[in-house]
Amino acid sequence: MPENRATLLIAAGSGAVAFAIGFNLGAFGEVFFDQVFTVWVVATIVFVGSLIADLPPRTWLRRLVLLVPSLWLLVSWLHNTYDLKYVDVRVVTAVSLIVTGVAIPYLGWVLFTVINPDFPNLSRRHRGAVLIAIAVSLVIGVFFGANNDAVLTCHDFKVSGNDLPDNCRRGLS
């Protein structure tokens, strides 16, 4: 059952990341910079690793996908450093969402391919199960983020060092 094990590992790891991103998107309406930076660091390390070692991804097209998070960094840097009218917050947000939507699932795929060489050999059914698990985790994260007042209080956000979402439940600390 190595195929089942690989499917479970990639779905659990990627699903947890998707849930966290979805929760913040639902609670605060944005993807937090630290999550995007984490994706950027991992993508950059995997990119460099694929160049200097015999590790996936081995094609240039797939390697270029790993540079997508660097695009977010570049756009943010341009937006924050220069007064460029054509680089507004919507562009930065759109690039962040592309980074999140494209790079995270692909990075998960690449990392599990490196860790478990049998992963590329998973059946379509198992790969589909992974994608569904990630999508469902993201949607559930957005739902719980948007409805955080049903399961968390403002105190929960405070003690964790987070800002308070507009709809957090007061009291019951």
Image (tube, grey):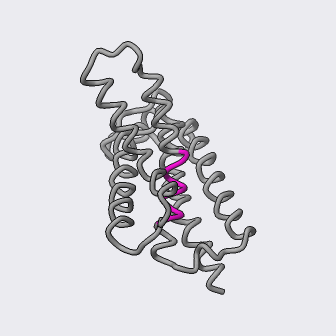
Give, as a single range, the part of the protein colored magenta. Answer: 101-110
Q: What percent of the width, then of the height, locates residue 50? A: 39, 66
- Residue under the image location 53 percent in, 40 percent down: 145
Residue 168: tell me if it is visible: no
Q: Residue lying furthest front in this view? A: 60
Residue, far bottom: 1
What residue is rendered at 42% in x and 35% in y? 171
* Residue shown at 61% from the left, 56% from the top: 134
Q: Is residue 87 above or below residue 103?
A: above
Q: Is residue 42 left or right of residue 109?
A: left
Q: Nearer the viewer, residue 103 or 27?
A: 103
User: Considering the image in quadrants, where does the N terminus appear?
Assistant: bottom right
* Residue 160 vs residue 170, the one in the foreground: 160
Tell me the chief SS of the magenta region: helix
Which x, y percent locates residue 154?
41, 37
Residue shown at the point (50%, 62%) measured from the top left: 59
| Image position of 116 (left or right of 55) | right
